[in-house]
Amino acid sequence: MADLPCPCGRPDARARPLPYAQCCGRYIDDFDATPAPDAESLMRSRYTAFVRERADYLLATWHASKRPSRVSFDAGARWLGLEVRAHQVLDDAHAEVEFVARQRDATGRASRLMERSRFVREGGRWYYVDGDLG
């Protein structure tokens, strides 16, 4: 599974999707030792965590001021892809990432989630704060 393409779709230098282990897997599977280096990497790894239903990672990377008590997943939902449209560093501790995530629900109905997400850096780690749906 570590050699399969990462669900986030981040490309390597040859425009091929990076393997999970070289992409989001290093952040998700070893959160304590390897934090995401920037807001875009954190957003991509959170998308991958939704695909893999890793509530532990999602909660750990959600800022405490906005963190829900639990994360639930839609039964039968299938994530289809991620497009990062913009990554804006506002200052050393704040950034925004605009993205579109595609999904198909259990009935086969497709949808797109568009969001401009806000991130904050504390103690050397990036955290998802919240976002505006588009």
Image (spheres, rainbow, N blue to C red):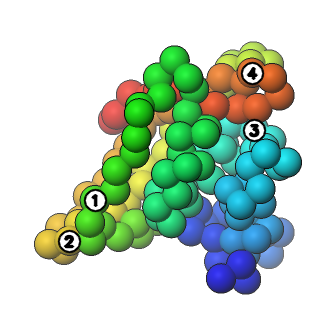
Q: Amino acid at mark 4?
A: Glu
Residue 58 location, quadrant: top right
**Label 4 neighbour load within 10 Å: few <14, some 14-19, many 20+:** few
Q: Residue at x 46, y 61 (%)?
A: 53
Report the label total: 4
Using the image as rendered, state which of residue 107 and residue 14 is in the foreground. Answer: 107
Q: CA distance from mark 3 to mark 1?
A: 28 Å
Circle 2 SS class: loop
Q: Which residue is mark 1?
A: 74
For the N terminus, the image quarter is bottom right
Q: Which residue is mark 4?
A: 122
Contact between labelled residues 2 and 1, with CB atoms less than 8 Å apart? yes
Circle 3 SS class: loop
Circle 4 SS class: strand
**Label 1 neighbour load within 10 Å: few <14, some 14-19, many 20+:** few
Q: Residue at x 48, y 29 (%)?
A: 67
Circle 1 SS class: loop
Q: Amino acid at mark 3?
A: Asp
Q: Amino acid at mark 2?
A: Ala
Q: Which residue is mark 2?
A: 106
Mark earlier in primary sequence (2, 3) = 3
Looking at the rendered image, the disc whose residue lies closer to the viewer, 2 or 3, is: 2
Residue 38 is tagged as 3
In screen coordinates, is 73 left or right of 20? left
Q: CA distance from mark 1 to mark 2?
A: 8 Å
Residue 41: image location, x then y, percent:
69, 47
